[in-house]
Amino acid sequence: MSSYSYGEDNMKVLVIGSGGREHALCSSFASSPKVTRLFCANGNAGIAEVAECVAIRPDDIAGLVDFAMTELIDLTFVGGETSLALGVVDEFEARGLRIIGPYRRAAELEASKAFAKDFMRRHSIPTAAYFNADSSDNAVMELESGRFGDASSPVVVKADGLAAGKGVVVAANRAEAIDAIRGMAGLVGGDAAEKIVLEECLFGKEVSILSFADGENFALMPVTRDHKRVGEGDTGPNTGGMGTITDGSLIDPLVLEAVVNSIIRPTLRGCIAEGFPFRGILFLGIMLTATGPKLLEYNVRFGDPETQAILVRLETDLVDICEAMLSGDASQAFSSISWRQGSSACVVLASQNYPSKPRTGDVISGIDLATRVPNVTIFHAGTARSTDASPEFITSGGRVLGVTATGDDLASAIRSTYQAASQISFAGMHFRRDIGR
């Protein structure tokens, strides 16, 4: 069992995951004077510059537990949804290990969109009208019944299970929706598409609202806006995220108060009522409609690339926040969390053919030049070294780098981000040039 006592400055921390989100988390933990050894399972080439990467997959729960026990890890932070859905928090706590993230039952809020929609209904949380179909045939029959409008009406088609941000199709009409239903298993895999959720198509501006939660109390993070589609002007297929911004203008304070009172508080109360108090990162996808904010979906962890844009503005030690969350009553600590004033922006540099079958193995140049731009941080997602001794980074995934900058206002943050991005190149590199615009 871990021997760490809060207040000591000799802490061993483990971060689970391998993307840009985890690089941002590792960078935050590495800046804490309380952390003396930092591990990441399984990490990437950029993370290896700030943490010790260990070759354990995020879905290898037994391997993660064994590692944490052997290394006497004092605190573990779960980056991605897969580990949470597999019950990593339950397994760690059963062995007396301290870990940040929701229990497996609470993780169902993300792992099953059907479960989440029913949860919203049970707790009167404003959301789109929906239908949970137990098969693609059932989903098509529901569409043809006219419940979601006539043949020309838009409708949202979602895979029930985890799909790395790619399991949502906003269909312009019934024919497109039926095509999406029939093709969902091929897009995200049969397990994720075993059930299909149909939703009324909401209109408005979308924002992401994240908060730290200890089960009952919560602390809001800077409001963000993600850019999901691969092409400029929000065109093309959905991706895991092509860029994000934080800025005070994204939501009116009165609307944010409505989100807190009609969505966040009822969610936390509902989790308690159903026997799975939510502790960890609560992520809300919100549509700001003409009739008020409505919940699109839950995530139960930091987003990617939202994390990159959020954590560069965090001034409070992330270790202290985690300790407060584990204490069971973080209300006082939550009220003193400090954020850098201004705005931030993150632009994702992607590999050729992303998001379908990204090309890998291309040499990346210009990272050193990009980091010379003031207020810029480069977070690695899909990178590797060509050999263990090589100084060169190469591409190893679809989303390769998250070029991130802070600024006194959004315009300056965006300007710095694109100035830095222009210094980087690799074969087939593409990125959106309209993030935040």
Image (spheres, helix red, strand yellow):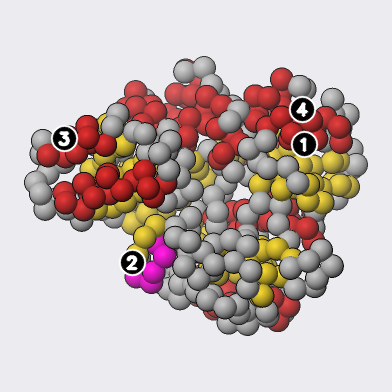
Residue designated by label 2: 235
Image position, residue 150 (x, y; %)? 9, 46
Q: Mark 3 vs mark 4: which is more N-terminal?
A: 4
Q: Which mark is residue 75?
A: 1
Q: Nearer the viewer, residue 396 or 302?
A: 396
Residue designated by label 4: 97
Quadrant assignment for the N terminus: top right
Q: Amino acid at mark 3?
A: Met
Q: Amino acid at mark 2?
A: Thr
Label 1 and label 4: CA atoms lie apart by: 7 Å
Q: Amino acid at mark 4?
A: Leu
Give the label, 3 or 4, closer to the camera: 3
Image position, residue 125 (x, y; %)? 35, 32
Is any atom of residue 317 visible in this view? no
Q: Is residue 267 above or below residue 251?
A: above
Q: Are marks 1 and 2 in contact (CB under 8 Å)?
A: no
Q: Mark 4 vs mark 2: which is more N-terminal?
A: 4
Label 4 and label 2: CA atoms lie apart by: 44 Å
Q: Mark 3 vs mark 1: which is more N-terminal?
A: 1
Residue designated by label 3: 141
Image position, residue 281 (x, y; %)? 58, 40
Q: Are marks 3 and 1 in contact (CB under 8 Å)?
A: no
How many marks the image carries: the answer is 4
Which residues are drawn in magenta? 228-233
Q: Mark 1 vs mark 2: which is more N-terminal?
A: 1
Label 1 and label 2: CA atoms lie apart by: 41 Å
Residue at point 86%, 32% (across, down): 70
Label 3 and label 1: CA atoms lie apart by: 49 Å
